[in-house]
Image: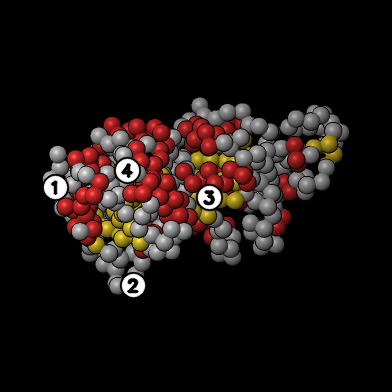
Amino acid sequence: PPPSIGKRWIRPDSATPSEWEAPSFAFAFDIDGVLLHERAPLPGAAQTLALLDYYHIPFILLTNGGGKFEADRVAELNEKLGSNMTTDNFCQSHTPFQELLPEYRDKTILVTGSDYEKCREIMEGYGFRSVVTPGDIFRAAPEVFPFDTVRGGEVGRELPKPLWKPRERKGLRGDDEAGGKTVLMGGKKGGEGEEGEGEEKRLEDHLKIDAMFVLNDPRDWALDVQVFMDLLQSKQGYVGTYSEENNRGNWQGDGQPKLFFSNSDLIWAAKYHLPRFGQGAFQHALVGIWKEVTEGKKELVRTSFGKPHRETYEYAEEMLVRHRGEWLKMKGYGEEDIRGGLKRVYMVGDNPESDIAGANDYDGKGRYGTEWVSLLVETGVFDAARMNFKDGDVRRADVVEKDVADAVKWALRNEG
Ligand code: G3P
Ligand code: MG
């Protein structure tokens, strides 16, 4: 068995009820740069989770990673780390997207990430009923993107509705035909698109996107940026239109789709010895292009989930409180032992901008009033030279330790 770590944490199975009490604290672990480098477990990671399991100390994994079903990622982590986690103690970047279901379940949304089809399946698995990818749009109209894509042509499903195409090119402004009113096709027999001569071409019969979601690090940035920017400048999200409002400087003022990112990580710790760009870099590419398109007149309106954002920590705290109760009951604790509630969460992370800032900002402000102690490890993106934050800076960790094992030892000593 692991080394004894003090009287109060003797193995509950062997102890009599008077000798032990349910831990009133728990851990939230970041993954990349704390437990893994990509798929490779970091030294001490598996043993640390085993130690917490042995002493019945609850924990969750709280990652800005994504792109897989929660159940699949948990199975992969259990296999790599020898742990026995479930989706009850696993929160990844887009897990909280499920909270947007009431608003978008029956609308059409666009998704992107490392694999278009996997991202579509994940969102359909959450319950979104009409999910489209940039690959679907490229398949329906390759002229949308005049270059080869990373994936080549074999992408995408048939679109739920046809794309709007102006009958003929009037410069780049097809908007007078897309003015939202019905327009007569007239002109050539069987004009462009699906209607014949003289039939009305109704904008609402065409593909409209109501929201756009980035689930994890996109691969086909060029195609994704083109499609996202088209939609941000469209008339009410109708693909292929351009809104007149833009010319009046009212950017994103014509019912264009809302834009959601699952995290804003500019960098993360992979196997390479230097930090790699994350989804935040894609977000900044869009922000930079939007600045050019709007001639600096309009900040890109968007919503980011993931650490350090408060909604993510609210979701994580709720998950921890629920998981702690269920898990301790499963370990044989009675209701009376668990009643003390969760008082403190030790957030172990490698990124001051996300893990540390989020924990510090949330400390004491949650629904359960839990104290969040931020522990920064040196096995990820942290660089003491560049990230030497002053007291009071939300990115300054409460504690800095070499690795996850030392961070947990510090916390257990702190619990006495
Ligand atoms: O894509 C993964 C990266 O954003 C960081 O993930 O586990 O360090 O929050 P994590
Ligand atoms: Mg990390």
Residue of label 3: 260
Q: Judge whether residue 271 can be spotted in this image.
A: no
Q: Tell me where residue 16 appears, x and y as whole percent.
A: 22, 44
C-alpha distance separating marks 2 and 4: 39 Å
Q: Nearer the viewer, mark 1 or mark 2?
A: 1
Q: Residue at x 47, y 48 (%)?
A: 262
**Mark 1 neighbour density, 10 Å: few (under 14) some (14–19) many (20 or more):** few
Q: CA distance from mark 3 to mark 4?
A: 41 Å
Name the residue carrying label 2.
392
Label 1 vs 2, first from the N-terminus: 1
The amino acid at mark 4 is Tyr
Element at label 2? loop
Q: Quadrant of the N terminus?
A: top left
Q: Secondary structure at mark 4?
A: loop
Tags 1 and 4 touching, CB below 8 Å: no
Q: Position of residue 123 (x, y in %)?
A: 53, 37
Q: Exactly how many numbered labels are in the figure?
A: 4
The quadrant in which residue 254 appears is bottom right
Query: Between disc 2 and disc 4, whose residue precedes?
Result: 4
**Marker disc for residue 333:** 4
- Amino acid type at circle 1 is Ser
**196 with respect to 98 (left or right):** right
Q: Secondary structure at mark 3?
A: strand
Q: CA distance from mark 1 to mark 4?
A: 20 Å
**Amino acid type for the residue under numbered disc 3:** Phe
Q: Secondary structure at mark 1?
A: loop
Q: State whether label 2 is within 8 Å of ligand 2.
A: no
**Pointer 2 with pointer 3, Cβ within 8 A:** no
Camera-side residue of 177 and 202: 202
User: What's the residue at 25%, 34% (across, down)?
Assistant: 82
Give the mark, 3 or 4, whose residue is nearer the N terminus.
Answer: 3
* Label whose residue precedes the other's in the sequence (2 or 3): 3
